[in-house]
């Protein structure tokens, strides 16, 4: 347990270290990009600024960019090393090579290759390269001299992926332990896709506006770097033209007044068009979702429409009745011109019937539309009420079973703690008698007076025409296998049948004998006698 707590604390501290390393990496990436932009603008405006590629300012800026890139690569390697440590803690392995998989190695290698791109100072290269240029008027391709900074500064914007990592590590979903636990139980990865979906669901317009402005500014500068060396315009005007071209292409308008003349610019134009189409579709979806009525608003509109249709239906029904009365009236009339009025009211009668049917159909469609709105909520509420009723009934049933079990246990304890004089005695039995009888001892007298049985007693013979009073005697059976005891009396049951059980003895030659097992006083008067009889072969209370 101590080792587990120690591992959990070490993992928490490691995650804070990962966040800190990510912050430093993003700062170094943005710093290097800003230094390159400043150097490119100063050297591009060399006619007015006097700064060239060999100037000390340019060399210092590029050297600082190289140093920041070196530390950025170190931070990236450190970040992946910490990720390997976290994977070791999660898996419980001891060797780092277990957690350092091929996928992780490939990701680290790609990140290092992307972030190591940066322009070097002039002292390490000649600074020029040949790039094809397409004339907009003659469509002829010629080669122009372009600084190597163009090829190295444009890919530096790929470092923007670190912004995505920064958003994930600083998001509320990642910082909250409960949210991470719920996501892990539902097999949801806390990656950039989940975070951006959450942000789009919470603040869609804000996300789209920030992304559009950032993309617009960055892509305009990259397009300027690709197109500013044709020599047709002043250098300071290229950025404004690039902003116009990128926005027109982003919105899929394309006026054609500005066209890219290099393959680098054309690639950026294609990328801008694809991204702009995606952003435009997302914007349309967000606007349509904002314009959609809520459930409460739909209920209000449905109620108003239903009230309107109800009034129209009443008016249509009244119109049908009115036209029916007018038709009946003019059919009975004999005045001249009543035929024209009759035809007029017949046409209005048919129109009223059609209007009534149309209103009924509109009401049916409105009811189906309302049912589609209420189905989900009503189903959820009904299911909740049903489950609550089932749980309540189950709890009541369990409580009743517990009470019944307690009563049975109390009864069992009472039977087990009875005195020995009242304990049942086991006796042997044959085919005619049961094996259980109760010793009465000295409490039972030798001769008990006759106890008349009621007319419904099952102790009597099956024949309803012969019912004799029940007699108790001390005559013991002769050959029934029971133990002879003076304390167990015998009951003679009157019967006209001559057939008797083989194991029962008769006192008078015609009356079978029954064994009295127990006698008890009745609260309403009289005596209960529990006997064993060969007639029904069961215990009965008389």
Image (spheres, rainbow, N blue to C red):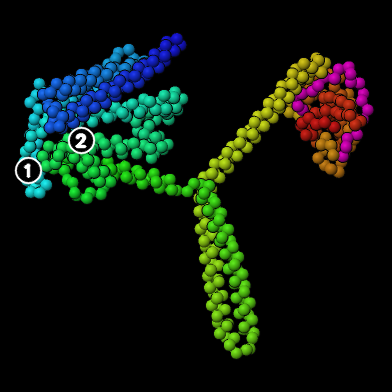
| Of 382 and 16, the residue lying toward us | 16
Residue 483 falls in image quadrant: top right
Residue 246 falls in image quadrant: top left
| Of 363 and 275, the residue lying toward us | 275
Residue holding disc 1: 141
Query: Is residue 375 visible to the viewer in this orientation of the structure?
Result: no
Total residue callouts: 2
Determine the main secondary structure of the stretch shown in magenta. Answer: loop
Q: Mark 2: give few (<14), some (14-19) or many (20+) Cα within 10 Å.
A: many
User: Where's residue 383, x and y in %?
Assistant: 56, 40
User: Where's residue 231, x and y in %?
Assistant: 10, 39
Residue holding disc 2: 222
Query: Is residue 338 visible to the viewer in this orientation of the structure?
Result: yes
Magenta region: which residues? 433-455
Q: Are marks 1 and 2 in contact (CB under 8 Å)?
A: no
Residue located 28% across and 46% down the image: 251
Q: Is residue 164 magenta?
A: no
Mark 1 and mark 2: span between their CA atoms? 21 Å
Q: Residue furthest top?
A: 2
Q: Secondary structure at mark 1?
A: strand
Residue 495 falls in image quadrant: top right
Residue located 39% across and 27% down the image: 171
Q: Residue furthest bottom?
A: 336
Q: Secondary structure at mark 2?
A: helix
Q: Residue furthest right?
A: 449
- Dot placed on the residue nearer the N-terminal end, 1 or 2: 1
User: Where's residue 472, x and y in %?
Assistant: 89, 28
């Amino acid at each position: 347990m101590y080792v587990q707590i120690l591992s959990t604390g070490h993992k928490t501290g490691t995650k804070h270290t990962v966040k800190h390393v990510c912050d430093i990496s993003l700062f170094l990436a943005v710093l290097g990009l800003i230094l390159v932009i400043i150097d490119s603008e100063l050297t591009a405006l060399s006619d007015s600024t006097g700064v060239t590629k060999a100037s000390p300012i340019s060399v210092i800026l590029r050297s600082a960019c190289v140093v920041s890139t070196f530390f950025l690569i170190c931070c990236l390697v450190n970040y992946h090393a910490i990720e390997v440590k976290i994977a070791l803690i999660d898996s419980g392995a001891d060797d780092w090579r277990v957690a350092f998989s091929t996928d992780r190695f490939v990701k680290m290698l790609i990140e290092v290759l992307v972030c190591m791109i940066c322009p070097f100072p002039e002292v390490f290269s000649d600074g020029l390269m040949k790039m094809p240029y397409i004339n907009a008027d003659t469509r002829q391709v010629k080669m122009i001299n372009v600084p190597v900074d163009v090829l190295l500064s444009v890919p530096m914007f790929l470092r923007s992926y670190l912004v995505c990592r920064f958003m994930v590590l600083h998001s509320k979903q990642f910082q909250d332990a409960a949210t991470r636990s719920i996501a892990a139980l539902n097999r949801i990865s806390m990656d950039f896709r989940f975070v951006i979906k959450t942000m789009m669901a919470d603040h869609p317009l804000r996300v789209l506006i920030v992304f559009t402005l950032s993309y617009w500014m960055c892509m305009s500068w990259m397009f300027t770097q690709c197109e500013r060396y044709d020599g047709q315009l002043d250098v300071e005007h290229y950025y404004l033209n690039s902003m116009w071209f990128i926005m027109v292409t982003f919105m899929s308008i394309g006026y054609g007044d500005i066209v890219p003349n290099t393959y680098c610019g054309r690639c950026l134009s294609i990328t801008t068009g694809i991204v702009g189409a995606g952003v435009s579709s997302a914007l349309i979806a967000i606007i349509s979702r904002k314009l959609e009525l809520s459930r409460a608003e739909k209920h209000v509109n449905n109620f108003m429409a239903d009230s309107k249709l109800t009034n129209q239906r009443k008016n249509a029904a009244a119109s049908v009745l009115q036209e029916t009365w007018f038709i009946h009236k003019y059919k009975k009339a004999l005045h001249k011109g009543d035929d024209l009025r009759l035809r007029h009211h017949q046409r209005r009668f048919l129109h009223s019937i059609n209007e009534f049917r149309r209103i009924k159909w509109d009401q049916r469609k409105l009811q189906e539309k309302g049912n589609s709105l209420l189905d989900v909520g009503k189903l959820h509420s009904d299911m909740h009420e049903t489950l609550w009723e089932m749980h309540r009934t189950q709890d009541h049933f369990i409580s009743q079973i517990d009470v019944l079990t307690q009563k049975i246990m109390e009864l069992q304890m009472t039977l087990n703690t009875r005195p020995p004089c009242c304990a049942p005695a086991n006796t042997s039995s044959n085919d005619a008698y049961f094996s259980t009888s109760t010793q009465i001892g000295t409490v039972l007298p030798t001769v008990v007076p006759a106890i008349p049985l009621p007319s419904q007693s099952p102790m009597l013979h099956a024949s309803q025409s012969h019912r004799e009073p029940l007699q108790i005697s001390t005559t013991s059976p002769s050959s029934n296998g029971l133990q002879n005891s003076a304390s167990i009396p015998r009951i003679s049951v009157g019967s006209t049948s001559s057939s008797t059980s083989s194991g029962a003895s008769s006192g008078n030659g015609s009356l079978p004998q029954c064994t009295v097992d127990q006698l008890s006083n009745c609260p309403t008067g009289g005596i209960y006698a529990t006997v064993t009889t060969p007639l029904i072969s069961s215990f009965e209370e008389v």
